Image (cartoon, grey):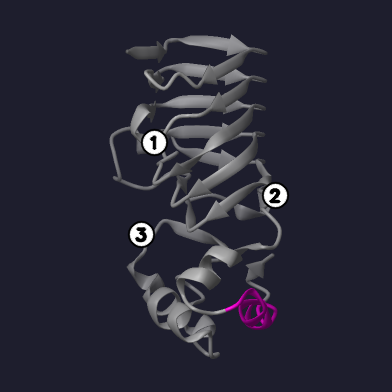
Amino acid sequence: MNIIYEDRVIEGERLALTDKEGNYYLGPNLTLRRCTVVTRVSARWLHILPTHFIDCTIEVKQELKNFPWVRASLKGCRFKGRMTSCDFGPWRDYTEGWEHGAVEDCDFTEARLSNCRFHGCDMRTLRLPPWPCFTILDPIGRLRELNSVEWPEQFGSIIIENFYKHPPSTVALTYHAPTVAKRYETTEEELKAVIEKFDCIVY
């Protein structure tokens, strides 16, 4: 069942994208202003076409994995919930409509971001999730500096050394320390000991 919101402005409403049989489409030509958007579906059933989210609260009730927010213009929004391998902001040529993507003045402090990327945006306008999340700013530009220290072995060799493979539009990467520690056979304490050495890492 396709549930489509398009070609209109919606203000001050609650949108519940929670029907397990629903295939949700937001956009194109949709503006949500001061709305609460609640999602409880997988990325497979959520499609965000060019849409403006202005001063909205976005509550992710079921972990959202591998989801591109790259066609969404997000301004003054607050995110809550768990997101893994999601992309925010304009990722050039990723998909039709990428040029509508933006993320500005948003608050992620109540979100858990794991292996998420930010593209083509001013990170200074964003409030990022605190530890145990950590965000590496300008990971491609700072690659040599980041490689100048010894990271916990697998995280360094598999993640840090391969930052150059990310799209050129990547301006920041956010990780979740407990997830990293479990996957790459290290500890949160070992990670934090290295993270604390860099002013380009926010935690």
Asked whether disc 3 touches disc 2, contact meaning CB atoms under 8 Å apart, the reply is no
Q: Secondary structure at mark 2?
A: loop
Q: Which residue is disc 2 drawn over?
A: 127
The residues colored magenta run 187-198
Q: CA distance from mark 3 to mark 2?
A: 23 Å
**Image mark for residue 27:** none
Within 10 Å of disc 3 (Cα), the crowding (few <14, some 14-19, many 20+) is: some
Number of numbered discs on residues:
3
Q: CA distance from mark 1 to mark 3?
A: 21 Å
Q: Which residue is disc 1 drawn over?
A: 43
Asked whether disc 1 touches disc 3, contact meaning CB atoms under 8 Å apart, the reply is no
The kind of residue on which mark 2 rests is Arg
Hey, which quadrant is residue 93 in on the image?
Answer: top left
Q: Which residue is disc 3 drawn over?
A: 167
- Estimate the x, y position of residue 123 in percent, counting from the top left: 61, 54
The kind of residue on which mark 3 rests is Pro
Asked whether disc 1 touches disc 2, contact meaning CB atoms under 8 Å apart, the reply is no
Q: Main secondary structure of the magenta part?
A: helix
